[in-house]
Structures are given as C-alpha cells and as structure tokens.
Amino acid sequence: MLKEFKEFLIKGNMVDMAVGFIFGAAFATLIKSLVANVIMPPVGMLLGNVDFSQLFIALDGKTYETMAKLTEAGAPAIKIGLFMNDTISFVILGFVMFMFIKTYNKMKKKEEEVVEEPTTKTCSECAMDIPIAAKKCAHCGNTEV
C-alpha cells in the first residue's frame, strides 16, 4: 500500500498540484495586501479619509473608536470594511485568474491549430490526388501537374 501511494505521488500530478496550491495561496496574500495597502487608502482618501478596515457596526449597542477596542471588548460586530476589502480582493483575484486561464487556453489552441503541410495535390487534368513531388500524373499521364 505504501508503494502504491509512492507511485501515486510520483506518477500523478500531485507535485504540480501542490506547487500550484502554494503559489495560489501566496498570490492571494499578495492581492489582499495590494487591496488593503495600495488600493483602499486612496479610495478612502477620496471618500473623506475613510479607513475601510475600521468600518464596523457594533451589535452590542455600544460605540467603539477602533476595531482594536471592539475586539478587546469582545463585542460582536458586522465588520463591513473588512468585508469590502475581501470582496475587492476576490474580484481582482478572479479577474487575474480569468486572464491567466484565457491566455493559457489561447496558447493551447495555437498548439492544436498547427497545420500540417499537404502531402498531395490535385491533377489539373483528371482531378485525382497525386503526391506533391510528382512531375507526372500516374492516373492520366498529364505532365502539367
């Protein structure tokens, strides 16, 4: 059983899948950082210096100045700003994956569309197929092929 598992790991695409999973997780972290640290600060500034990571609704009826104080108090909350950041991250990541897959499919399609050179031509006299290198038609004897 251990031998079969080893063969499965080696022959299957397990290593490719693991590398893809790790790369995908790292890429998602990068996108999340892009949204939180690069995209949302200017958006917040344009909307009147709003820090989206600090937008929340405390469900206990009290008012908290920051997310840290809310968390420290252990109060339940709807964390709208974090949800907005995650939604934007998801949209960007989805778009990047769409573009990656679109490019991959386009490259794959080009490989499939490789046209083979013809090996025959049609005789102008009898319309039979003859080898491309033929100087004379084997069917009718025409030399103007």
Image (cartoon, rainbow, N blue to C red):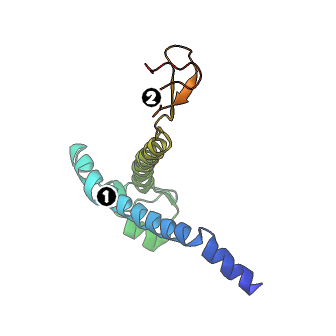
> Which residue position is annotated with label 1?
34
- Residue 38 at x, y percent in the picture: 26, 56
Type of residue at label 2?
Answer: Lys
In the figure, is residue 84 to the left or right of 17?
left
Find the residue positioned furthest to the top. Answer: 125
Q: Quadrant of residue 138?
A: top right
Q: Which mark is residue 135?
A: 2
Quick check: 112 above or below 73?
Answer: above
Disc marking residue 3? none
Question: Are dots 1 and 2 in contact, CB under 8 Å?
Answer: no
Above or below: residue 9 compared with residue 96: below
Residue at image point 67% right, 78% down: 7
The residue depicted at 44 percent of the width and 67 percent of the height is 23
Residue type, label 1: Leu
* Residue 69 horizontal/vertical position (percent): 39, 69
Q: Is residue 100 left or right of residue 35?
A: right
Compare residues 59 and 124 and report the one nearer the observer: 124
Q: Identify whether 93 is placed above or below 2.
A: above
Question: Looking at the figure, which quarter contains the N terminus?
Answer: bottom right
Residue 113 lies, in percent from the top left, at 48, 39
How many neighbours does mark 2 have within 10 angstroms: few (below 14), some (14-19), or many (20 or more)? few
Q: Nearer the viewer, residue 37 or 123?
A: 123
> For this rendering, which residue is in front, 105 or 117?
117
Quadrant location of the C terminus in the rendered image? top left
Which residue is depicted at the point 50% across and 59% down?
77
